[in-house]
Image (cartoon, rainbow, N blue to C red):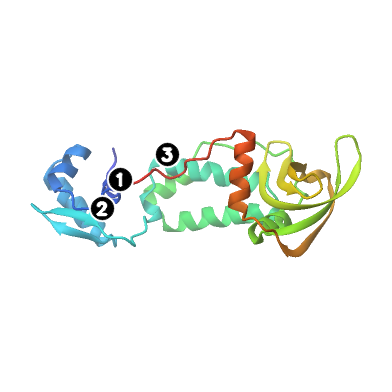
Amino acid sequence: MSRSERLLALLQLLRGHRYAITGTELASQLGISLRTLYRDMATLQAQGAHIEGEPGIGYVLRPGFMLPPLMFSEEELEALVLGSRWVAEHTDSALSAGARSALAKIEAVLPDEYRQQLHANTLLIGSSRHDACTDEAPLRSAIRQQRKITLSYRDLREASSERTVWPFALGYFEQVRVLVAWCELRQDFRHFRVDRISRLKLEEIVYPKGRAILLKEWRATQQIPQPQFIADRN
């Protein structure tokens, strides 16, 4: 384990305890000596971590400290680079620019060692065959604002219809983008291929259910488990 990874692990241990934990226990869980632990504590405090405590009593990380980007593990950094590269290559111009900007901000605060790893990252993204001219920005805006949209849609049988829907999710697949919405006409959840939407009008009306509720209900109907992005704290 590198020193940067060890500091990250120490912070994660502290974040997982609401009450003070002794230096001996922390050192044991990390597999390091007490002397090394005390040096690491001093380093984290110098970097702005609000750690209270002292040897023989215990340590606690007070609320409000944000994990600095420079503390990414190698796997986390690779995941961020890979994800950003995929978005930059496979989405519309606005989201692509956002991914490149985010990656540039991460690079700006990384220490030299990690910046070199970022540039030498060997996880590559293939060229996109998706139509880059498709602009999903209005759909993302409608989802964020939880506003109804009226769209003209052409299905796979080439039949055209006009629908008023409640958009709450956008699926990014290799070949197509799919809007997930509640359809007022069908009174049910429906999926619309973005490349088959010929016209879109953003309505002033906010739909009555929150998008988080709609997403949860849709997941239940599709038997899709809820994602677990953040580990539960003790």
**Res 137 quadrant in image:** bottom right
Q: Residue at x 74, y 43 (%)?
A: 188
Q: Are marks 3 and 1 in contact (CB under 8 Å)?
A: no
Task: Indicate which disc residue 226 carries.
Answer: none
Q: CA distance from mark 2 to mark 3?
A: 27 Å
136 lies left or right of 224: right
Q: Position of residue 51 (x, y in %)?
A: 23, 59
Front residue of this view, candidates 139 and 219: 219
Q: Quadrant of residue 146?
A: bottom right
Which element carries disc 3, helix, strand or loop? helix
What residue is rendered at 80% in x and 44% in y? Answer: 186
Q: Position of residue 109 (x, y in %)?
A: 42, 58
Q: Amino acid at mark 1?
A: Asn
Asked if 113 appears above or below 53 in the picture, the reply is above
Q: Which residue is mark 1?
A: 234
- Please name the residue that numbered disc 3 is placed on: 75
Q: Residue at x 26, y 52 (%)?
A: 18
Q: Earlier in the sequence, mark 1 or mark 2?
A: 2
